[in-house]
C-alpha cells in the first residue's frame, strides 16, 4: 500500500490536530510559555509535514544526516555528493544552517517549502553568507535520483538555534542517517535522538566515523550491544574509516557502503514503501510527541480553575459583608433623623393614623407626600450616598485582594503585566454603584405599590408618596445608628420606631414583613450583580488565556489522555 493511499482519513485528522494546536497560546504557563510555544510549533510542523509528504508519495526521499559535534556530518555529505557542498573545519560549530543536496533532476521538488517550510531557499550560496532561517540548496549528479541529503548543525551544539535547525530537519526526515564516533556512539544526547527514531519507526542507518582498522570489530560489536539494549534497530550500521580529508571530502571507497545503501533506497517503489512506513510510524508516534503539550494543557486548566476560584472567592461574600455593614448602622446625620421622626411620628400624625384606615391615603399624601417632598428627597439622597460609599468600599476591598492574589502568583503576575488595566482601580465604579442604588430605591417604591395594593391605599399611586413610604421602609429595615453619639442613637431609635409603627398601620404586619424581606433581597441581588461585573474583566482575561475547550478535547483525544 502506498504512502498516498494509506489511512487517508487518519492523515487528514492530523491537519485538524495541527489547526487546534495553533490556537494554543500557553498564556497560563508563565515562564514556560516560550518553550511550550516552540514545542507547539515543532509538533505543528511535524503534523503538517506528514500531510505534505502523504500527498507526494513518489517524491525523493529526504535523508537527514545528523549527529553530535565532530562526527563528520559535513565531510560525509560532501563525500557522498562528490564535491564540497557544505563547509567543513575544526572550528565548532562549523555548520550553522541546513544544506540540502540532491540529483539535478530532483531539484524542483525542494525549490518550494513543501519540505522544511519557513526556510528561505538559497541556490549554491557562497561560503559564510547564509543565515539561520535559510536553506542552502545544491545539486550533484553523484547522488542517485530520488535521494536528497540534508546536512544539519550539531544536535548538541552550544547554540540553541543550531539545535532547533537540526530538530526541524529530523522532523521532516523520511530516513535518518545518524553519525557518531567511537567516543560518542553511546552518549545520552545521541541515544535520546535514536530513541525518537525508534518511536517513530523511522528507517535509520548508523555510521561510526573515524574508525581505525584495529578497533573496528570491537567498536561495532559494542555499538550493536548498546542498540539492542535500547531497542534501536537500524536498517544498516556501517563503519567509516579514518582517512585523509581532501577538498572537504573522504576518498570514495570510504563511503562506498553508504553510497550503496542510498542507491538501494532510490527506486520509486522502494521510496514509496519507505515513505509509507515513515508516515505510519509518525502517526503512531503523535500521542507521544504531544505528551509535553498535553501535560501543559492540563496544567493550564488547573491554573485557570485556581485563579478563577480565587477571584470568585474574593467577591463571594459581598452580599454578606453588605448585610453586616448595614447591621452595624447607616451613618445618617442626627438632625436629618430627628426631622424624619417628627415627620412620621408627630402627635398629629399618630392621631390620624389611629382614626380610620380610610384616612390613611390622606395621611400618606399630606405627611409623607406633597408637604414633605424636599425632606423625603434629602433622606433618600443621604441613604443613597451612604450605601454608595459602603458598596464602593466593599467592591474595592475585594478587587484589591484579587490584585494581591494575582501579584503573589507567578502566572497571575504575568497576566497583570500583559494586561496592566487590571492593576487600575475601577474608574467607572462609582457611577455604576450610584445608578444601582438609585434604581433599587425606585424599585422599593414599586414593591410598596405591589404589597400595599390589598389595603387599597389610594395615595400609593402618587409617586412622591410611594417614594416616601419606601424610604420609611428602608429606614425600618436598616439600623441607622452608625457613627452616632449616645444621645443621637436615641433619636435614630425613635425615628425607626415611628417608621415601623406607620408602616404597620399603612400596610399591615404581614405585608410589612414581606416588603422588608423583598427590599433587602433586591438590594443584595443588585450588589451581587455589581460584584459579578467587577470581577468579569479579570475572569475574561483568565478565560482568554486558558486553552479553548475544543482544543483541550482534541489534545486529550489525540494524546489518549481522556479526563
Image (cartoon, grey):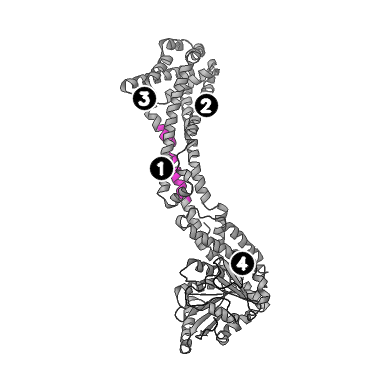
- Kindly identify the residue that appears in the image at 50 percent across and 66 percent down: 161
Question: The N terminus lies in which quarter of the figure?
Answer: bottom right
The magenta stretch is 304-323
The residue wearing badge 1 is 401
- Numbered circle sitting on residue 205: none
Which is nearer the N-term, disc 3 or disc 2? 2
The residue wearing badge 4 is 50
Which is nearer the N-term, disc 1 or disc 4? 4
Residue 307 spot, x, y in % from top left: 45, 48
Which is nearer the N-term, disc 2 or disc 4? 4
Determine whether the residue tagged by mark 3 lies in a helix, strand or loop.
loop
Between 169 and 399, the one nearer to me in the picture: 169
The residue wearing badge 3 is 481
Which is nearer the N-term, disc 4 or disc 3? 4
Question: Crowding at label 2, few (<14), some or many (≥20) Cα neighbours within 10 Å?
Answer: some
The residue wearing badge 2 is 443
Quadrant in which residue 481 is drawn: top left
Which is nearer the N-term, disc 1 or disc 3? 1
Q: Give the Cα separation between the discs numbered 2 and 1.
A: 32 Å
From what the image shows, is residue 554 above or below residue 255? above
Question: Crowding at label 4, few (<14), some or many (≥20) Cα neighbours within 10 Å?
Answer: many
Amino acid at each position: 500500500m502506498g504512502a498516498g493511499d494509506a489511512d487517508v482519513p487518519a492523515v487528514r485528522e492530523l491537519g485538524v490536530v495541527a489547526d487546534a494546536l495553533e490556537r494554543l497560546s500557553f498564556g497560563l504557563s508563565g515562564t514556560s510559555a516560550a518553550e511550550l510555544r516552540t514545542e507547539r510549533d515543532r509538533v505543528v510542523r511535524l503534523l503538517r509535514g506528514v500531510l505534505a509528504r502523504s500527498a507526494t508519495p513518489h517524491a525523493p526521499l529526504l535523508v537527514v544526516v545528523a549527529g553530535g559535534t565532530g562526527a563528520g556530518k559535513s565531510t560525509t555529505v560532501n563525500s557522498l555528493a562528490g564535491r564540497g557542498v557544505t563547509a567543513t573545519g575544526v572550528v565548532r560549530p562549523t555548520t550553522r544552517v541546513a544544506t540540502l543536496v540532491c540529483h539535478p533532476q530532483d531539484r524542483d521538488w525542494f525549490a518550494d517549502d513543501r519540505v522544511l517550510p519557513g526556510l528561505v531557499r538559497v541556490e549554491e550560496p557562497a561560503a559564510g553568507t547564509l543565515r539561520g532561517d535559510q536553506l542552502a540548496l545544491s545539486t550533484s549528479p553523484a547522488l542517485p535520483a530520488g535521494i536528497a541529503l540534508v546536512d544539519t548543525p550539531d544536535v548538541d551544539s552550544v547554540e540553541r538555534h543550531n539545535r532547533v535547525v537540526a530538530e526541524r530537519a529530523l522532523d521532516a526526515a523520511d530516513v535518518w542517517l545518524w553519525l557518531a564516533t567511537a567516543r560518542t556512539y553511546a552518549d545520552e544526547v545521541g541515544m535520546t535522538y535514536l530513541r525518537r527514531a525508534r518511536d517513530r519507526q523511522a528507517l535509520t542507518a548508523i555510521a561510526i566515523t573515524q574508525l581505525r582498522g584495529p578497533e573496528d570489530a570491537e567498536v561495532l560489536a559494542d555499538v550493536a550491544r548498546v542498540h539492542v539494549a535500547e531497542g534501536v534497530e537500524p536498517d544498516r550500521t556501517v563503519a567509516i574509516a579514518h582517512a585523509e580529508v581532501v577538498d572537504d571530502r573522504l576518498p570514495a571507497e570510504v563511503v562506498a557502503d553508504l553510497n550503496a545503501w542510498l542507491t538501494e533506497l532510490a527506486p520509486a517503489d522502494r521510496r514509496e514503501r519507505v515513505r509509507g512506513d515513515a508516515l505510519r510510524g509518525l502517526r503512531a508516534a503523535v500521542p507521544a510527541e504531544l505528551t509535553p503539550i498535553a501535560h501543559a494543557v492540563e496544567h493550564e486548566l488547573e491554573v485557570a480553575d485556581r485563579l478563577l476560584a480565587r477571584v470568585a472567592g474574593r467577591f463571594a461574600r459581598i452580599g454578606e459583608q453588605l448585610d453586616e455593614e448595614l447591621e452595624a448602622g447607616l451613618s445618617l446625620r442626627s438632625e436629618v433623623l430627628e426631622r424624619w421622626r417628627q415627620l412620621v411620628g408627630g402627635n398629629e400624625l399618630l392621631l390620624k393614623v389611629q382614626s380610620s384606615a380610610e384616612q390613611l391615603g390622606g395621611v400618606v399624601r399630606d405627611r409623607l407626600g406633597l408637604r414633605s417632598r424636599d425632606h423625603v428627597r434629602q433622606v433618600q439622597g443621604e441613604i443613597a450616598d451612604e450605601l454608595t460609599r459602603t458598596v464602593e468600599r466593599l467592591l474595592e476591598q475585594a478587587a484589591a485582594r484579587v490584585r494581591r492574589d494575582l501579584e503573589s502568583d507567578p502566572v497571575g503576575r504575568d497576566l497583570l503585566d500583559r494586561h496592566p488595566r487590571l492593576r487600575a482601580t475601577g474608574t467607572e465604579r462609582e457611577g455604576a454603584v450610584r445608578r444601582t442604588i438609585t434604581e433599587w430605591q425606585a424599585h422599593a417604591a414599586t414593591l410598596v405599590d405591589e404589597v400595599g395594593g390589598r389595603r387599597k391605599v389610594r395615595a400609593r399611586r402618587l409617586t412622591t408618596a410611594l417614594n416616601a413610604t419606601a424610604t420609611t421602609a428602608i429606614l425600618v429595615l436598616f439600623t441607622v445608628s452608625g457613627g452616632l453619639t449616645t444621645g443621637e442613637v436615641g433619636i435614630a431609635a425613635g425615628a425607626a420606631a415611628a417608621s415601623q409603627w406607620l408602616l404597620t398601620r399603612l400596610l399591615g404586619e404581614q405585608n410589612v414583613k414581606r416588603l422588608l424581606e423583598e427590599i433587602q433581597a433586591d438590594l443584595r441581588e443588585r450588589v451581587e450583580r455589581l460584584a459579578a461585573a467587577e470581577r468579569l474583566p479579570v475572569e475574561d482575561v483568565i478565560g482568554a488565556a486558558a486553552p479553548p475547550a475544543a482544543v483541550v478535547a482534541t489534545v486529550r483525544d489525540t494524546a489518549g489522555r481522556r479526563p
